[in-house]
Amino acid sequence: LFAWVSSDFQTQLTDEAGPFVDIDGDEISVGQQYIFAFYWCVMTLSGGSPPTNPTTETDMCFWTVISFIFVLISNISVGILCGIFDKFMETDRDLSDHLQIAMRYITTHKLSPFLKGRILSAVRCAHQQMLEEGSFVDDVEPLLSEDLKGKIKGAI
């Protein structure tokens, strides 16, 4: 965008003021303007500049490639970390959902404090087992009596 604007601006200026020149008075070509524009965009994306300012187009191209690789690596890393965090939060939400169901069952039925603690502990253990082996229903349901399965399903 910068190069396009500057080249359009250059055509307006060349009619009136002549071509763009650098500090030394040398004429700057449109290709050099594009290289500088791309260099400037990538440096802005990466949030910094190289240790030494580039003096040639080769230096600009080199630092542009290095900085672009940095931008790619940092964006990919952030994406991976966000995916890991989302997966962690998903398992935490599953445990919270299971505990809410158990609490709903506990509050609708008069249970002793000992039994309440045991049910919540069983839900936490079953959730941990699910994380380790992957199947909540297949592992826990066979351990429950038919009467208790009916009460739990009725409460849900």
Image: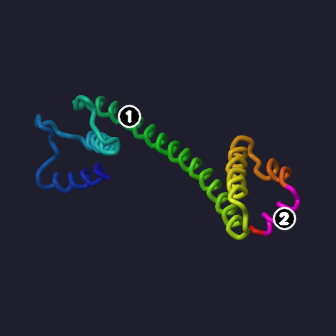
Secondary structure at numbered mark 1:
helix
Q: Please check the rendered image and state whether residue 28 is part of the magenta-colored stretch, yes or no.
A: no
**Magenta residues (range):** 145-154
Q: How many marks?
A: 2
Q: Say which of 108 and 80 sits in front.
A: 108
The residues bearing labels 1 and 2 have C-alpha atoms spaced at a distance of: 65 Å
Q: Earlier in the sequence, mark 1 or mark 2?
A: 1
Q: Position of residue 20 (x, y in %)?
A: 17, 45
Residue sitting at x 26%, y 51%: 7
Secondary structure at numbered mark 2:
helix
Residue pointed to by mark 1:
65
Q: Say which of 20 and 81 sits in front.
A: 81
Residue sitting at x 71%, y 61%: 112
Predominant SS along the magenta part: helix
Label 1 is placed on what type of residue? Val
Residue sitting at x 17%, y 39%: 27
- 21 relative to 110 in the view: left or right: left
Extreme-right residue of the structure: 146
- 85 relative to 7 in the view: left or right: right
Label 2 is placed on what type of residue? Gly
Point out which mark residue 150 bears.
Answer: 2
Q: Please check the rendered image and state whether residue 146 is part of the magenta-colored stretch, yes or no.
A: yes
Q: Say which of 140 and 41 sits in front.
A: 140
Q: Position of residue 113 (x, y in %)?
A: 68, 59
Q: Position of residue 152 (x, y in %)?
A: 78, 63
Q: Relative to residue 77, is residue 58 depicted above or below?
A: above
Q: Relative to residue 54, is residue 83 depicted above or below?
A: below
